[in-house]
Amino acid sequence: MPSIVCSNQSGIARGLVTLEQYHAVRVRIGELLEAAGATLLDSFVCPHHEQFTGPCACRKPGTLLFERAASLHGLDLSRSMFAGDKHRDVAPAVQFGAPAYLVRSPDTPEEHVTRARADGAEVVDSLLDAARRYLERAP
């Protein structure tokens, strides 16, 4: 089962990190995952932020990053798992009819938990918990 990351990275728009620095971190994470026996097939990033670069279609909860991933890798987004610690990470699952898991973290506002639950997302304590629940339900 391929693993793909779609990520908002407003630090790029804010000038805090460069796209090259982001890619270097992405490569290193891929190496660490591979050393642990996991594979990250691809990564899609939105380097924008509406306050700095104006609105865009790729910033989550927009769906452009997911649509690009699906097109490039032949994915059925309705059978994909959407997970993250903010409502915007799981909101696209509703549009695709896919399972969603809000991973509660210290940075997750309670409002995001409420909105995610209202959208049908399960609230879990870890990404591992989300993956286990997804695999248990997958046909």
Image (tube, grey):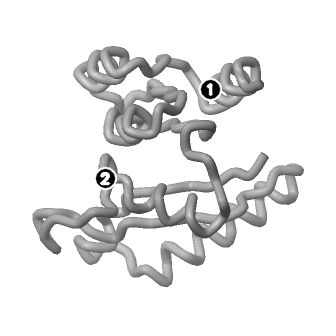
The answer to whether 1 appears left or right of 18 in the picture is right
Q: Nearer the viewer, residue 131 or 36?
A: 131
Image location (x, y in percent) of residue 131: 68, 30
Vertical placement of residue 51 versus 36, above or below:
below
Q: Which residue is disc 2 drawn over?
A: 62
Q: Residue at x 31, y 58 (%)?
A: 59
56 with respect to 131 (left or right): left
Q: CA distance from mark 2 to mark 1?
A: 22 Å
Within-10-Å neighbours for mark 2: few <14, some 14–19, many 20+: some
- Using the image, tell me which numbered label, if any, was put on residue 65: none
- Relative height, residue 9 to residue 76 (above, below): below
Q: Earlier in the sequence, mark 2 or mark 1?
A: 2
The percent position of residue 102, horizontal first and vertical second, equals 46, 27
Front one among 64 and 130: 64
Helix or strand or loop: what does disc 1 sit on?
helix
Question: Residue 99 appears at what percent x and percent y?
Answer: 54, 28
